[in-house]
Image: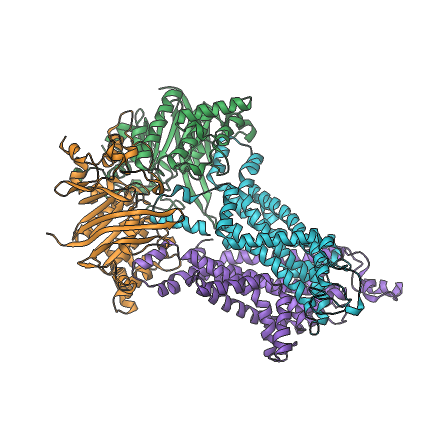
Chain colours: A cyan, B orange, C purple, D green
């Protein structure tokens, strides 16, 4: 955004600032600029890194076993012994959170990668090929988007049945359509761009144009979409789990922990609110990072 | 001495950045006598648009005016509070822009947009404002004015839109019209129509400050011309004198570039190099790096804007010598 | 204009049929005989077969689908396995609650969101801007169930200001509406802020300033209407996410709405009910989009005249 | 005159404009381009000159008509059959900011055409050739691995020219190549274009709205109005003695950079440009032409004339 605005000001006042306009700075320069100008995005990146480290080293970091029951200490509030308290089975919530973060992070990243790959491929194909392929893909996307995502996810989960893999598949199927739409519109505008026409004049073949000229210029958008879709996937999964439709025990995702804790909302609110807060924190971090990336990488995406 | 509609003295404006302030307008003084057309000419990035915006008080943040006086009809408006400054815009001074495509509100009928200007400065009814708008449309040569007034901008051609802009600017009969590249986005036949319209406005008593990069437009319309380069005025003179006896090497370079194009022949005259980055201006004269006549002192000290003949000033160490030759 | 709306309408019908077909096929490929699932382990084979024939489930799938669509057009979505009542009757009872909840949430989201977005844009980088944008980001980042439970815990359980669940009076809608609308309010506020800031950089804003308009006039007369165009598109899309969120909100606050019906349908493995609720919400979304398209044409004269 | 390089016969192009309407961008245009010459194509925005340029080099498919390269039809060839001829027809774009892929280095940009026509067998040979081309267009060799955004407009246009000449084309369509540039830089590019033509002998189709630029660079000129050629002939003949009323108005409208020639009473064109969706019957200029008669409103004038000079007007000026 900042970049865009600066360019508008420069144009309005008709002054020359070559190094300032920075049409297509190198990726590294952009990242450095974001680090300098957007502290929040950097802090968020750090938070995300911490979560990832926590998930990877869960066995080392967990103070207690995540599955062993301890009925003597059930529902004990956060305190010295159990930093985040214990649940209805007396299990240490911090330990369960650490293990749960593995599922929740995976559920954020894997389906997003799948849906991005599918959406980007279909969107680019539709935009580049046009004609009936375009019409087909876009009508399909319309259909996917017309059904509220929660209900779509519910119907797909019903069809596929429970299980982590099925959650991955469901979230991928739910999210590809919006990615496809954005990538298609970008492909369309890139297809009309002069440098793609210039490549055609030179005789570059169509697949090469797609790979060398269109894909690299879609990449910033895809990176930004990725950081914004991961939290969306985490939220959808947690909602599904909250309804008891997502990950099933003994896999512990944060959403599932909230679902179980809900029965104890009034006497042990930390059971629900600790995992909720974790979801909020990671989603917030991804959103901040996504905003920061968008500002430097792809200011035009703002209104999508 | 003739009365001055506008007298800008020592204008400075710039944009603050991490790498320091960009001085896009540096000590620019401009006089617009009543009833005349004064031009500012320069290439892209010379600061001419920002000068116009500074005078109008239409800087876009973070760009800002950092110094200077602006005398409009005999009073300094540069330090007026924004409220009073605003009351002047549209009534005593107005401005038209380069892009008639984007300068009109796309979701508002054009007649309404002109009537809006009326109602801002005159206490009249909506019907009366609409009537005056249509009247003004006729005055700027829009045929079928009443029905055109009910159009949205996208339904009009570029030339008509620019006429609407002029109608909007002139509807309250301001003394001063600032026109920032008013014909650059238009075709030549339309450009000619708009130029004639502006000439007529001037004949009717409006003073015009015309910003353009097109020497043809300047030659056809202006009485007096300022040449800007890298944020400063490098030469100013009456239009005939400027075109016949340019004193600054930059002005000469520009004129040669244009006239060699018209002369025919194999090679065209050019100016070496490119317009410098405002953040990295050379020491001494800003034009020194591109100047064929550059001497040692040109690279060391910035020349003053000196009078070399009555009403003719140039910012060049060598100007006098050249003017005699 | 009429033509393009007609085209939109036809597209909407196609989308609806597509959704119906998709759901229909997906729910039919579930392993196991749905009737057997429904009737439990103790039903004998004969009864299951009789019921299967009665429900038409022994016929080829395209015949089933055609019959389903024709019935649906007459308002008949079949009979719920688990509740033994016609699906249309169940949905009719639930629809009012969902509609009231969605409207309340949308009102909250859009009024608060647009107001906050405008203030944030005008006071760019000021205290209010940071405050409102902070709240927006919270709304966008908190899962709906978290907001719902938090509100329930604080305002209903601790402070006793508002009812914990149910919608017996209008007070019952307040917490669910905020829980459901906060997310949308957040995204609307962010979009309003950024488009408004964008619009304020447009050339025609300079024109308005050049004719002597002050900042409030520019904002109201010139900037807002232009800035609302992308916001409208987003609001139409939010109808869908509001209905998604309603599933959660209704569950937390025990409101008998379409969303809760869908959750019950899943736990009861009740295909007609799930199918009905999914189709019905889609219909609402599609209608909402149609409405938004026509409103968009009213707001933007460029669309109005072109195809 | 020398060999006919490219010929267009009755070329038309329409674009859909919604609601079953079509924009008539180019209508029934026939023209010839000779080897080694520069043909200027002038006209105001929307007259179809850019579309015509793209039709001629097969970037856009015509709605009707034929394009012949050295006497051989190319408009009906398949993409594969046309591929070997592609390198003969090149294009220089107006906007040097938009026509270079921002993510490619100068080397990659200039090497791309060399690769597609397999001109250089090895990497070293390619780099060598790229450096030669950079010398030829006046971009310093040390900028080989720079990105486009690090250059000024004029420098970028030079890179664009290097790409166009890399494949040793027979014809380069220059689509407003200098209108985005400042006057001083514009002349540098025009000089470069002429030098390259003198040393390499290709033809130019030079599209511009700037009449003085066209006058400087062209051997012959075509004037277009609303999708049709209304006058064509040797440059000096057209500029000194225009015969189509539209050409005359166009030339008169150019503001002369000479304050002494001010106030010469110039007749201005009145009225609005007719819509290309619904062009007028008969002569397309008749709605704005002060000399129009009833015949002009009904009969469409064909290009006619002796020798090289042709005009499409029922009542040409003398």
**Image location of residue D96, percent across then percent down:** 41, 37
Q: Is residue A221 above or below residue A264?
A: above
Left or right: residue A95 compared with residue D57: right
Image point (27%, 38%), residue name: B284
**Image location of residue D118, percent across then percent down:** 54, 24
Front residue of this view, candidates D215 and B229: B229
- Which quadrant of the view contains residue C58? bottom right
Quadrant containing the C terminus of chain D is: top left
- Which quadrant of the view contains residue D152? top left
- Which quadrant of the view contains residue A275? bottom right
Quadrant containing the N terminus of chain D is: top left
Q: Is residue A252 above or below residue B323?
A: below
For residue D213, say whether it is visible.
Answer: yes
For residue B99, say whether it is visible.
Answer: no
Left or right: residue D318 compared with residue D127: left
Q: Is residue D242 above or below residue C169?
A: above
**Image location of residue C247, percent across then percent down:** 66, 66
Left or right: residue A53 compared with residue C181: right
**Image location of residue A79, percent across then percent down:** 69, 67
């Amino acid at each position: 955004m900042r970049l865009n605005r600066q360019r508008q000001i420069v144009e309005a006042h008709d002054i020359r600032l070559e190094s300032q306009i920075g049409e297509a700075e190198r990726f590294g320069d952009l990242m450095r600029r974001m680090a300098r100008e957007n502290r929040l995005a950097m802090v968020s990146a750090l938070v995300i890194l911490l979560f990832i480290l926590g998930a990877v080293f869960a066995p080392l970091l967990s103070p207690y076993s995540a599955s062993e029951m301890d009925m003597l200490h059930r529902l004990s509030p956060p305190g010295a012994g159990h930093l985040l308290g214990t649940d209805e089975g007396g299990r240490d919530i911090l330990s369960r959170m650490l293990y749960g973060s593995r599922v929740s992070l995976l559920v954020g990243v894997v389906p997003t990668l799948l849906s991005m790959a599918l959406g980007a491929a279909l969107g680019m194909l539709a935009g580049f090929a046009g004609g009936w392929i375009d019409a087909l893909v876009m009508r399909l996307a319309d259909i996917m988007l017309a059904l509220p995502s929660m209900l779509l996810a519910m119907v797909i989960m019903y069809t596929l049945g429970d299980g982590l893999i099925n959650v991955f598949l469901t979230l991928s199927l739910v999210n590809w359509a919006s990615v496809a739409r954005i990538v298609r519109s970008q492909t369309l505008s890139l297809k009309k761009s002069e440098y793609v026409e210039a490549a055609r004049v030179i005789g570059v073949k169509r697949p090469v144009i797609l790979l060398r000229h269109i894909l690299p210029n879609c990449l910033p958008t895809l990176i930004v979409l990725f950081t914004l879709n991961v939290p969306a996937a985490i939220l959808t999964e947690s909602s599904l789990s909250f309804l008891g439709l997502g990950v099933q025990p003994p896999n512990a995702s944060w959403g599932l922990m909230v679902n179980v804790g809900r029965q104890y909302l009034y006497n042990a609110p930390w059971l629900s609110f600790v995992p909720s807060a974790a979801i909020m924190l990671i989603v917030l971090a991804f959103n901040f990072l996504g905003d920061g990336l968008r500002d430097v990488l792809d200011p035009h995406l703002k209104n999508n | 001495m003739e009365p001055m509609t506008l007298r800008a003295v020592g204008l400075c404006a710039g944009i603050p950045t991490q790498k320091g302030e960009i001085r896009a307008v540096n000590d620019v003084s401009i006089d617009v006598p009543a009833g005349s057309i004064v031009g500012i000419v320069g290439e892209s990035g010379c600061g001419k648009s920002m000068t116009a915006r500074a005078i109008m008080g239409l800087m876009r943040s973070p760009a800002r005016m950092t110094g200077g006086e602006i005398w409009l009809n005999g009073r300094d408006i540069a330090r007026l509070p924004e409220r009073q400054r605003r009351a002047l815009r549209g009534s005593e001074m107005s401005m038209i822009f380069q892009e008639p495509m984007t300068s009109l509100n796309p979701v508002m009928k054009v007649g309404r947009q002109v009537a809006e200007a009326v109602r801002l400065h005159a206490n009249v009814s909506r019907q009366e404002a609409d009537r005056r708008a249509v009247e003004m449309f006729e005055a700027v040569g829009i045929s079928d004015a009443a029905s055109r007034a009910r159009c949205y901008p996208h339904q009009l051609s570029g030339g008509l839109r620019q006429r609407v802009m002029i109608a909007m600017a002139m509807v309250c009969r301001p003394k001063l019209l600032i026109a920032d590249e008013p014909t650059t986005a238009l075709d030549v036949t339309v450009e000619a129509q708009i130029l004639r319209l502006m000439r007529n406005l001037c004949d009717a008593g409006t003073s015009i400050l015309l910003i353009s990069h097109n020497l043809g437009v300047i030659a056809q319309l202006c009485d007096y011309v300022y040449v800007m380069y890298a944020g400063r005025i490098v030469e100013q003179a009456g239009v005939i004198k400027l075109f016949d006896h340019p004193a600054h090497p930059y002005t000469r370079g520009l004129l040669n570039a244009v006239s060699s194009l018209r002369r025919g022949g194999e090679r065209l005259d050019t100016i070496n190099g490119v317009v410098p980055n405002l953040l990295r201006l050379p020491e001494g004269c800003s034009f020194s790096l591109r100047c064929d006549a550059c001497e040692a002192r040109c690279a060391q000290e910035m020349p003053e804007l000196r009078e070399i003949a009555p009403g003719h000033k140039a910012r060049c160490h060598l100007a006098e010598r050249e003017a005699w030759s | 204009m009429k033509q393009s709306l007609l085209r939109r309408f036809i597209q909407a019908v196609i989308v609806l049929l597509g959704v119906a077909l998709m759901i229909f096929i997906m729910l039919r490929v579930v392993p196991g005989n749905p009737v057997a699932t429904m009737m439990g382990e103790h039903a004998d084979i004969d009864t299951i077969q009789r019921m299967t024939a009665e429900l038409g489930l022994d016929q080829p799938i395209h015949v089933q689908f055609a019959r389903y669509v024709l019935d649906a057009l007459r308002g008949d979505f079949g009979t719920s396995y688990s509740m033994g009542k016609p699906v249309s009757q169940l949905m009719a009872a639930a629809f009012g609650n969902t509609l009231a909840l969605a409207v309340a949430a949308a009102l909250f989201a859009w009024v608060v969101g647009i107001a906050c977005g405008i203030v944030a844009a005008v006071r760019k980088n000021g205290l209010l801007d940071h405050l409102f944008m902070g709240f927006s980001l919270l709304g966008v980042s908190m899962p709906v169930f978290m907001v719902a439970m938090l509100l329930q815990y604080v305002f209903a359980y601790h402070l006793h200001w508002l009812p914990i669940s149910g919608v017996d009076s209008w007070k019952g809608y307040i917490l669910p509406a905020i829980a459901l609308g906060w997310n949308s309010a957040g995204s609307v506020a962010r979009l309003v802020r950024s488009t408004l800031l964008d619009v304020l950089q447009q050339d025609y804003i300079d024109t308005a300033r050049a004719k002597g308009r002050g900042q409030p006039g520019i904002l109201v007369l010139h900037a807002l209407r232009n800035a609302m165009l992308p916001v409208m598109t987003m609001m139409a899309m939010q109808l869908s996410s509001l209905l998604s969120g309603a599933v959660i909100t209704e569950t937390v606050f025990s409101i008998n709405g379409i969303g809760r019906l869908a959750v019950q349908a899943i736990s009861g493995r009740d295909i007609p009910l799930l199918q009905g609720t999914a189709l019905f919400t889609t219909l609402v979304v599609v209608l909402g989009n149609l409405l938004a398209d026509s409103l968009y044409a009213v707001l933007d004269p460029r669309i109005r005249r072109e195809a | 005159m020398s060999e006919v390089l490219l010929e267009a016969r009755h070329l038309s192009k329409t674009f859909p404009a919604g609601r079953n309407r079509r924009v008539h961008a180019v209508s029934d245009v026939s023209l010839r381009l000779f080897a080694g010459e520069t043909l200027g194509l002038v006209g105001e925005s929307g007259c179809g000159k850019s579309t015509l340029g793209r039709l001629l080099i097969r970037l856009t498919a015509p709605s009707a008509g034929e394009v012949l390269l050295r006497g051989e039809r190319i408009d009906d060839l398949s993409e594969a059959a046309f591929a070997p001829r592609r390198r003969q027809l090149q294009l220089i774009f107006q906007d040097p900011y938009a026509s270079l892929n921002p993510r490619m280095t100068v080397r990659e940009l200039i090497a791309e055409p060399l690769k597609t026509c397999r001109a250089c067998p090895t990497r070293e040979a390619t780099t060598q050739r790229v450096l030669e081309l950079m010398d030829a267009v006046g971009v310093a060799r040390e900028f080989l691995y720079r990105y486009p955004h690090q250059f000024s407009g004029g420098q970028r246009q030079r890179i664009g020219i290097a790409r166009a000449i890399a494949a040793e084309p027979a014809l380069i369509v220059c689509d407003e190549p200098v209108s985005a540039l400042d006057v001083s830089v514009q002349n540098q590019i025009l000089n470069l274009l002429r030098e390259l033509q003198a040393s390499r002998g290709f033809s130019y189709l030079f599209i511009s709205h700037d009449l003085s630029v066209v006058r400087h660079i062209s051997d012959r000129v075509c004037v277009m109005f609303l999708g049709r050629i209304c006058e064509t002939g040797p440059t000096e003949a057209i500029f000194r003695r225009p015969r189509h009323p539209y050409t005359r108005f166009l030339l008169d409208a150019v503001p002369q950079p000479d304050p002494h020639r001010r106030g010469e009473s110039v007749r201005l064109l009145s009225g609005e440009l007719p819509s290309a969706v619904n062009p007028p019957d008969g002569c397309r200029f008749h709605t704005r032409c002060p000399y129009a008669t009833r015949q002009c409103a009904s009969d469409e004038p064909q290009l006619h004339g002796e020798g090289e000079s042709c005009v499409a007007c029922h009542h040409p000026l003398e």
